[in-house]
Image (cartoon, rainbow, N blue to C red):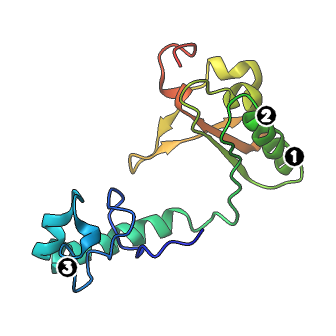
Amino acid sequence: MTSNTPTDTPSDANAECVGPTAAEAGKASACAGCPNQQKCSSGAFNSPEAIAKAQEEANLLKASLQNVSHVLMVLSGKGGVGKSTVAAQLAHTLASQGYAVGLLDVDLCGPSAPRMVLGERHRDAQITTSGSGGWVPVYNPDHPNLACMSISFLLQDHDSA
């Protein structure tokens, strides 16, 4: 499925957004009911400050992902089909072949990837922050090229999710 939505649209824009920098921004029929309609029609997204801020954010994102070569996503519209198991097995397999692998577990209801990546060490695992304030993933001590980041690391009780 392709989308006609411009890449500079706010994340909460209507599905058929014409884009905040378009001449008809905030005035097109697709803008009706959009939470950004007033900002778009006022030109707030076109101000030099807004453009500079957007460019700075894009540069920071690009810099932070410069060492990421590939991204694999394991997803399904159904629960309990083994998404975390497949993701963890892929991560272990790629790490065993020498690749640097990071697994991001975004399962809010039952984050199980840390257990599959770190084994029983997952209970003692804690994330730390970098000098710039970003979170540093937890690395598997047996496989230093295999890292995991999960919401479970942010919980006081690992069984809370």
Label 3's element? helix
**On the rendered image, what quadrant is the N terminus found in?**
bottom right
In the picture, the disc for residue 93 is: 1
**Residue in the picture at 74% in, 38% down:** 83
Q: Position of residue 142 (x, y in %)?
A: 81, 34
Q: Name the residue type under label 3.
A: Asn
The mark closer to the camera, 3 or 1, is: 3
**Sequence-wise, which precedes: disc 3 or disc 1?**
3
Q: Is residue 32 left or right of residue 93?
A: left
Measured Cα–Cα span from mark 3 to mark 2: 45 Å
Label 1's element? helix
**Residue in the picture at 72% in, 24% down:** 115
**Sequence-wise, which precedes: disc 2 or disc 1?**
2
In the picture, the disc for residue 85 is: 2
Relative to 100, is 32 above or below? Answer: below
Determine which quarter of the picture holds residue 57: bottom left
In the picture, the disc for residue 46 is: 3
Q: Looking at this view, name the residue that lies furthest to the left.
A: 42
